[in-house]
Image (cartoon, grey):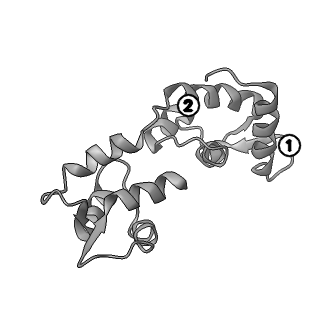
Amino acid sequence: MSQLTEDEKLEYQDTFNLFDTKGDGKIFGHQIGEVLRAIGQNPCNQEIEKICGNDKENRISYETFLPMLVSVRKSEVPVSRSDLIEGFKVFDKEQNGLVHASELRYFLTTLGEPLSEAECTSLLSGFGENNGYINYEEFIDTILKN
């Protein structure tokens, strides 16, 4: 998975170029996370900090970006649906496939890489609450589709 095919390199360069606002073949360091996410990676903020350090205003070329991409691809650990379900079961006190919406909101906005209130509201808005509860298997399926 760490090696990129020529087709992938060309595809990723096209995406990289979309973020090149000056037309000089470079992006700002603070755009690295956006570019990685645009090409389907999901690095956490800590990982992005590690990659670009304090060079957020420096501009980097695609050739400099490529090893960063490979590094992120190597470190990404796939999460399965069953792993997520097992995680949610910890919060399913009544073992009925439901978690309280306010509890889920709390976890999403405070733990790990927290979402903003607006992001959390947007994420949860598509789920019909059942007396204040959300079916976490439906939630997981929707998240994994996107």
* Residue 75 rendering spot, x and y as whole percentages: 49, 27
Q: Quadrant of the N terminus?
A: top right
x 35%, y 42%: residue:
82
- Residue wearing tag 2: 72
Query: Which class describes the residues within 10 Å of circle 1: few (<14), some (14-19), or many (20+)?
Result: few
* Residue 48 rendering spot, x and y as whole percentages: 52, 39
* Residue 98 rendering spot, x and y as whole percentages: 24, 63
Q: Residue furthest left?
A: 94
Q: Amino acid at mark 2?
A: Val
x 69%, y 32%: residue:
65
Please say if 21 is above or below 128.
above
Q: Residue furthest top?
A: 3
Q: Residue furthest front?
A: 96
Closer to us: 2 or 113 = 2
Q: Amino acid at mark 1?
A: Asp
x 62%, y 29%: residue:
68
* Residue 100 rendering spot, x and y as whole percentages: 22, 67
Q: Residue furthest bottom?
A: 131
Label number found at residue 139: none
Query: Which class describes the residues within 10 Å of circle 2: few (<14), some (14-19), or many (20+)?
Result: some
- Residue wearing tag 1: 24
Task: Say whether disc 2 or disc 1 marks the residue closer to the N-terminus.
Answer: 1
